[in-house]
Amino acid sequence: MYLTWLDNNSWLLEIGGQRILLDPWLVDVLTFGGQDWFFKGSRSHDRLIPENIDLILLSQGLEDHAHPPTLKRLDRNIPVVASPNAAKVVQQLNYTQVTALAHGETFVFNQSVEIKATPGSQVGVTLVENGYLLKELESDFTLYYEPHGNHSPTLKEIASVDVVITPLIDLALPLVGSIIKGNKCALEVAQWLQPQVMLSTAAGGDVVFEGLLNSFVQTKGSIEEFRSLLVKNNLLARVIDPKPGERFEVKLEKRVPLA
């Protein structure tokens, strides 16, 4: 398994011989509803769009997960698996192969990777977007992704997961609390899933954030503090702190079945 973090929530997952582009924001600025006075994300230069993408995977329909300028630059014939809300975004952009996954539904891609949607982040009053479990069918290695740190208790039913990608650091607003839940929520999901490897998403990288909202955001915790938290709780997960744009191999060990 090879991973490349592309800043923010964007990842290139190489799993089961497939190249899966996850929640890509690669070009142009990031705003919500074009209101850059309220929030604007930018980088000094656009990221190169990865070649030979087999599948696009979208967890949410918001712009920081289903980024319209990036999606307009990608080939509309690339298959897409998405939350129902994100599926509407790519359908409006005339993507030709779109599969919407509701919570608990599973999609097998090219007989190589099984993708299962889990309950993820609550967006608005009633809408709950997707997290994902991706299983490499040949090896049974499994990766879990949830970009805001909202982990469904249904994950307790899963025996184990090998790789977890989720926030490890809190981003909070005064009076509101954490809007990106790392730290204790990441520890909790580590206790449930017993992963071999954990990686942080949603914060850091080569991105500059501006606007009214960003002026109130507070960062709580660090990668080193989270490593210490794992040790204190007798958890053996390795925490990898990737550099944006650098492809790396995630080395995993086969688990021995319990007798």
Image (cartoon, rainbow, N blue to C red):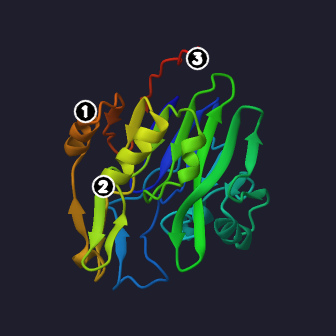
Mark 3 vs mark 1, CA separation in Å = 24 Å
Q: Which residue appears at 75% of the width and 46% of the height?
A: 107
Q: Earlier in the sequence, mark 2 or mark 3?
A: 2
Which image quadrant is residue 135 in?
A: top right
Of the two numbered discs 2 and 3 in the rendering, the one whose residue sits closer to the viewer: 3
| Classed neighbour count for the residue bearing mark 3: other residues with Cα under 10 Å, few (<14), some (14–19), many (≥20) | few
**The quadrant where residue 75 appears:** bottom right
The disc placed on residue 206 is 2
Q: Position of residue 36 (x, y in %)?
A: 38, 82
Q: Horizontal and vertical percent for residue 223? A: 25, 44
Taking depth in this image into account, of 177 and 218 the one nearest to the observer is 177
Residue beneath label 1, please? 231
Q: Secondary structure at mark 3?
A: loop
Q: Nearer the viewer, residue 159 or 21?
A: 159
Where 18 sits versus 214, above or below?
A: above
Q: Which mark, residue 257?
A: 3
Question: Identity of the amino acid at label 2?
Answer: Asp
120 vs 220, left or right, is right
Mark-to-mark CA distance, 2 and 3: 41 Å
- Checking the image for residue 126, the label placed there is none
Residue 19 visible in the shown view: no
Spatial distance from mark 1 to mark 2, Cα to Cα? 29 Å
Task: Say which quarter of the image contains residue 208.
Answer: bottom left
Q: Quick check: can you spot residue 35?
A: yes
Q: Is residue 84 left or right of residue 250?
A: right
Residue drawn 67% across the image and 58% down it: 82
**Residue 28 pos. (x, y %):** 45, 67
State the residue at coordinates (25%, 41%). Answer: 229
